[in-house]
Amino acid sequence: MASPDTRSQLLDAAEHLFAEHGFRGASVRAITELAGANLAAIGYHFGSKAELLAAVVRRVVEPITTAQAAGLDRLLARTPDPPVADLVEAFAGPLFDAMLAGDEGGARTSRLIMRIIGDPAEEMRAWTGSAEAAVRDRYVTAFGCALPGLSAAELWFRIRGILAVAAVDRVDVHNEPVPDCPPSGEPARRWAITFLAAAMSAPPSSPGP
């Protein structure tokens, strides 16, 4: 009989292997072996490997989206038109806080987010639900009001860039610490938010020829 903790062990093992190898590269056998479970355990606890992935990603992402939503609520309670820098902090701050470079757990979160962005497997994009979509749409609307000169396509490109820059930076600093570069904590957070706010506030790109 499976132990009561088997589900958590499967989530931990799958998070590690999905972050390192992607959806297709992390086999059911590898996940169950790392979790110390039998091959049928994923089907029993989650239904399928894809549903296990969704559970893994939600476990990582839900605290981030909850913090992002709360940050936007606080801004909108103060003013109906928050400035770009404040929106960036509310959106990027929780990403940065969840991906602390000084520990393996934070680096693994960064790797998993990078996998979500770059993995070609459709399953990596099929996990999102209404909660994630609602937070995304609220930020798109808020940034659109603060940056009315941007097209919808360029606005969404820049918002995606916040996610990508935060994840890549955290993995890179964890893998190769840079002298005099704070790996985590408030100084590093401020560096990131200052840079990202400037990027979001840049003038619209000129149309091509």
Image (spheres, rainbow, N blue to C red):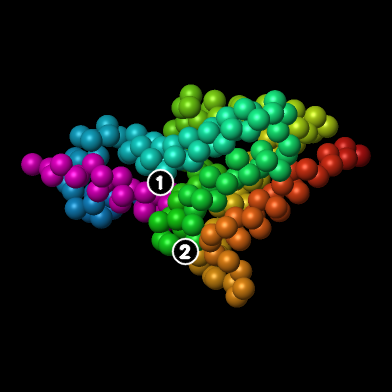
Under mark 1, the amino acid is: Arg
Q: Do the residues labelled 2 and 1 touch (CB within 8 Å)?
A: no
Decide whether residue 16 is among the magenta residues. yes
Q: At numbered mark 2, what does the secondary structure look like: helix, strand or loop?
A: loop
- State the residue lying farthest toward the front: 78
The segment highlighted magenta reads 1-25
Q: Is residue 64 above or below residue 25?
A: above
x and y, in percent, of residue 142 in the image: 68, 29
Tell me the residue at 62%/27% (across/down).
77
Question: Of the residues under marks 2 and 1, which one precedes in the sequence?
Answer: 1
On screen, residue 106 versus residue 158, left or right, reads: left
Q: Tell me where residue 174 appears, x and y as whole percent.
A: 50, 65
Give the residue at mark 2. Answer: 102
Residue 24 vs residue 69, the one in the foreground: 69
- Answer left or right for 76 relative to 32: right
Q: Residue 24 carries which label?
A: 1
What residue type is disc 2 on?
Gly
Mark 2 vs mark 1, foreground winner is 2
